[in-house]
Amino acid sequence: MRRVLGVIGVTVFLCVIPAMLESAEQGGASLSPSGYALPAEPDEFDRREVNAYYDWRNNMFFRVFKLADQESKPDFMTARRTYKVSVNQYGYEVAITFAHPLFYWVDLDGNGEFEPSKGEMWIDVEEDGVNGNERLYDPMTPGEGPRGPVPMPPALPGRSRQPL
């Protein structure tokens, strides 16, 4: 009887512990290293989007959002790489971009600025959307991130941009 209970105990232990570890890994997958979960990027033409523009200096398409409420300062921004940019028949720039952003910024302290040095910038090197593999990005850390120029979030209208 003792042997049977021991075998049952070992079997339960070997089955339950890996399942618990797997669920813990999946549950924590949406948290970035800082413990903050990035919000999902709103759809195109979402009312929370306050600005969208192409920056030719780094060949990226930026989208700026007010996720908290419309009376607040912008608190979320994304940047996508672009395939092609052209001007349509009405004179507007049209950017064809990758499906998911490469960079994410979240204004964690609510001051209206996106500050990578304060842990407010994330990179998704796989460009597969917000799924937990994003990591904090510091443009001043050598050897980290994509090849090519580092995108500096452009100054919002009416604000001066100070170097990091």
Image (cartoon, rainbow, N blue to C red):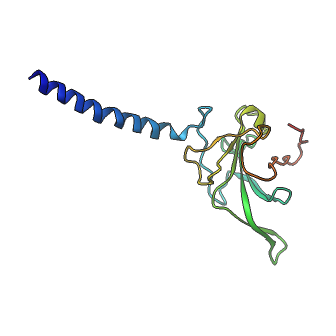
**Is residue 39 or residue 10 the one in the foreground?**
10
Task: Point out the residue furthest to the left here.
Answer: 1
Query: Residue 30 location, x and y as percent?
Result: 54, 41
Query: Residue 141 location, x and y as percent?
Result: 76, 37
**Is residue 14 or residue 53 the one in the foreground?**
14
Q: Is residue 68 left or right of residue 23?
A: right
**Is residue 83 or residue 38 the one in the foreground?**
83
Q: Is residue 124 above or below residue 53?
A: above
**Is residue 155 or residue 148 the one in the foreground?**
148
Image quarter in which the C terminus is found: top right
Image quarter in which the N terminus is found: top left
Q: Which quadrant of the view contains residue 133?
A: top right
How many labels sit on residues?
0
Q: Which quadrant of the view contains residue 44?
A: bottom right
Q: Is residue 86 above or below residue 34?
A: below
Residue at the image point whose x is 80% and y is 72% from the top: 86
Residue at the image point whose x is 80% and y is 49% from the top: 151
Q: Is residue 120 left or right of residue 58?
A: left
Q: Is residue 116 above or below residue 153?
A: above
Residue at the image point whose x is 67% and y is 62% from the top: 98
Q: Is residue 149 left or right of residue 146?
A: right
Query: Residue 25 location, x and y as percent?
Result: 46, 37
Task: Point out the residue furthest to the bottom here.
Answer: 89
Q: Is residue 38 left or right of residue 15?
A: right
Query: Residue 150 location, x and y as percent?
Result: 80, 48
Residue at the image point whose x is 80% and y is 75% from the top: 88
